[in-house]
Amino acid sequence: MADSPSFTPSQGELDSCSCDPTKKGSSQDAKGSFDWGGCSDHVEHAMRFSQAFVDAKERKERDARALMNLHNNRAGRKAVKRFMTLECKCHGVSGSCSVRTCWLAMADFRRTGDHLRKRYNGAVQVAVNQYGTGFTAAHTHFKRPSKNDLVYLEDSPDYCIRDHESGSMGTVGRVCNRTSRGVDGCEVMCCGRGYDTSRVSRTTKCECKFHWCCAVHCRDCHQQVDVHTCKGQT
């Protein structure tokens, strides 16, 4: 059986997701005028499609959690659209760029992800209003969430301690990285309780060589390493 043909949406090769048809003619930006060309990512179509696909289950439920998910889904889509970038190609004699052809493209998703991570860290706790149609701030000193904010209904469990009801195993006894400042670091993972250090012997395969044909022979190397584990509650 022949391989199925592959299509790239950004090249406008999918009938249901072609280039953005509204991006045609001429326009202007801070650098001057340009002609629309290339294939602008059809973000409006993508937003409609993802909304119909991702929001379908939530629209059936219509409870507090569904409203929260619908709000956060919408904020995510708006973030993708927000970071659309204008990419251009110059035309002219000797690179004079007398004419520019430009198109809109989605930014690298890392940029969108970093933005949403910041929104997640600053998420607003909310409560459903009396009509069950929207949100109010859960506390009077909290701001009312905007359409770009992420929201949540309940505080997360304390994952530092074991809690069978929430499914949290806690971090007591977890191996941590003493030198890391990230989430795997002892300072963060051990939740301020401190950590124990033990010296253990490890055996690893080393000095591996390929022998024709066909085997790989290795030596067993032994080394003493420090292992750091989170302390329990004091």
Image: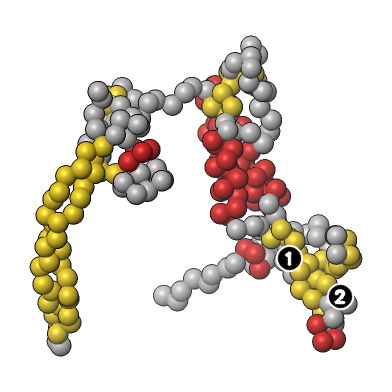
Label 2 packing within 10 angstroms: few (<14), some (14-19), many (20+): some
User: Which of the 4 quarters of the picture holds residue 72?
Assistant: top right
For marks 1 and 2 on the same chain, the one whose residue lies earlier in the sequence:
1
- Residue 151 quadrant: top right
In the structure shown, which secondary structural element does the residue marked by tag 1 occupy?
Answer: strand
Q: Is residue 18 left or right of residue 178?
A: right
Q: Left or right? Give the position of 40 relative to 112.
A: right
Q: Is residue 72 above or below residue 7?
A: above
**Residue carrying label 2:** 99
- Decide which of 175, 223 is in the foreground and name it: 223
Q: Is residue 47 above or below residue 3?
A: above
Labelled disc at residue 205 = none
Looking at this view, is 137 or 179 the one in front?
179
* Percent position of residue 110, x then y: 56, 54
What's under tag 1, amino acid-wise? Glu
| Residue 56 shows in the view | no
Is 176 in front, or is 134?
176
Residue at 65 percent across and 64 percent down: it is 10
Residue 135 at x, y percent in the picture? 63, 21
Question: Which one is in front, 170 or 195?
Answer: 195
Residue at 89% x, 65% y is 32
Residue underneath mark 1: 87
Question: Residue at position x 62%, y 63% from top?
Answer: 9
Q: Which quadrant is the N terminus positioned in?
A: bottom left
Q: Amino acid at mark 2?
A: Val
